[in-house]
Image (tube, rainbow, N blue to C red):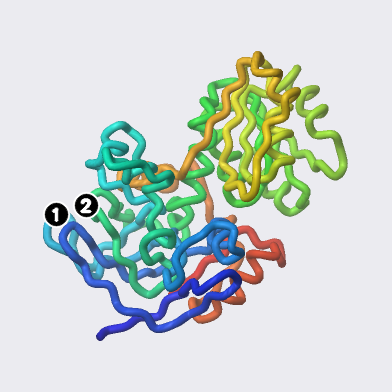
Amino acid sequence: MATMRANVFHSKGKFGVAETPMPKAGYGQAVIRVTLTTICGTDLHIVRGEYQIKPGLVLGHEPVGVIAELGAGIAGYDIGDRVLVGAITPCGQCRACLSGHQAQCGQSAAGYQAIGGWRFGNTLDGAQAEYLLVPHAQANLAKIPAELTDEQVVLLSDIASTGFSGAESGGVRLGDAVAVFAQGPIGLCATIGARLMGAALIIAVDTDPLRLRMAVRMGADIVLDPKQTDVVADIKQLSGGGVDVAIEALGLQETFENALRCLRPGGTLSSLGVYSGKLHVPYDAFAAGIGDYRIVTTLCPGGKERMTRLMELVRHRRIDLAPLLTHRFSLENIAEAYDLFGRRGEGVLKVAVKP
């Protein structure tokens, strides 16, 4: 049996590179040779035991690669094509996809599985490997323009698509005031997304000076450190009574609550954080239910069309995500990469992993 090297999850706190079976493309599937991938905050939730997956699964869900094998039923692609694949792989045919909820692909008359469209490193072997099996390949292989490098597009697979969608789902309009809580990789992309959507004032919140400096580079007008100031009071003063949209990109009770408290009446809280444990909505912050607040959540939009559109933003120089890739590791050193990323050492934002 042909094998490959891959980062395999075993149990809480236990994972590592091992020999695993080489994938084989079936009908409607493709195998790509992974040329670049990353570590995501969700991967940390998994290895820390905060999100459950089955032991033996390969981790990772942000793949760029080259088509190595095509199954039957795939048209318009050739072996050797460079492709970007979204972290979410919709089929395009189920009830959720046909209803416009591609991220929830997997709904059926038989039942509903939340985040059903997130398969890599969740229900299927993921991208921290030499090769990756792509389901529903016709709907999910996005060809990379020749002039773009792997590093220019790899973050589009998940964090950029997710961060931008925080602004999209939040309904940011021309001239809006927006606060983005947490300036990690997704929060930074939410800051970029607010700028792309036409926000007039973008306030970025974080405790890390390096991340606040990057937020300014990515489009924030004002940065606030909650260790140094009352961010809710400051945001209300700066925005004339409250922001139109607050984007929460960390997944903590405190940041969720602060995002809700800084809204103007009729404002929207766009939640991107992955929460572990219980999340409470305070009675007073919720204005007893009469503040006309809207709370929305968003899972990363995926699929070929989404990836193609995001690559056009890069190709036409509307966005540049390369500065967010601060560290690079080989697959063999991925344990070291997880350690660095998990403890936020050396000013890390995103780690690139090259199989």
Report the number of numbered marks.
2
Q: Looking at this view, is 176 or 278 the one in front?
A: 278
Q: Residues within 10 Å of mark 2 (few under 14, many from 20)?
A: many
Mark 1 to mark 2 CA distance (whole Å) = 7 Å
Relative vertical location of residue 150 with respect to residue 112 in this rendering, above or below:
below
- The residue at 68%/39% (across/down) is 181
Left or right relative to 204: residue 140: left
Report the residue at 61% width, 76% height from top: 336
The quarter of the image holding the C terminus is bottom left
Can you name the residue that lies furthest to the right here? 228
> Residue 36 appears at what percent x and percent y?
43, 67
Residue 138 circle label: 2
Hey, what amino acid is under mark 2? Gln
**Residue at mark 1:** 75
Is residue 52 in sight in this rendering?
yes
In the picture provided, is 96 more to the left or to the right than 353? left
Q: Residue at x 40, y 52 (%)?
A: 118
Query: Which residue is nearer to you in this view: 160 or 252?
Result: 252
- If you read the primary sequence from the N terminus, does the residue marked by circle 1 or circle 2 appear first? 1
Contact check, label 1 and label 2, Cβ < 8 Å: yes
Picture coordinates of residue 151, whole percent (x, y): 47, 61
Give neighbour class at mark 1: few <14, some 14-19, many 20+ (Cα, 10 Å).
Answer: few
In the figure, 117 relative to 129: above or below? above
Residue at position x 30%, y 31% from top? 99
- Would residue 110 appear left or right of 252 to someone viewing this image? left
Q: Quadrant of residue 262?
A: top right
Q: Amino acid at mark 1?
A: Ala
Q: Considering the numbered disc 2 on the image, is that residue within a helix, a strand or a loop?
A: helix
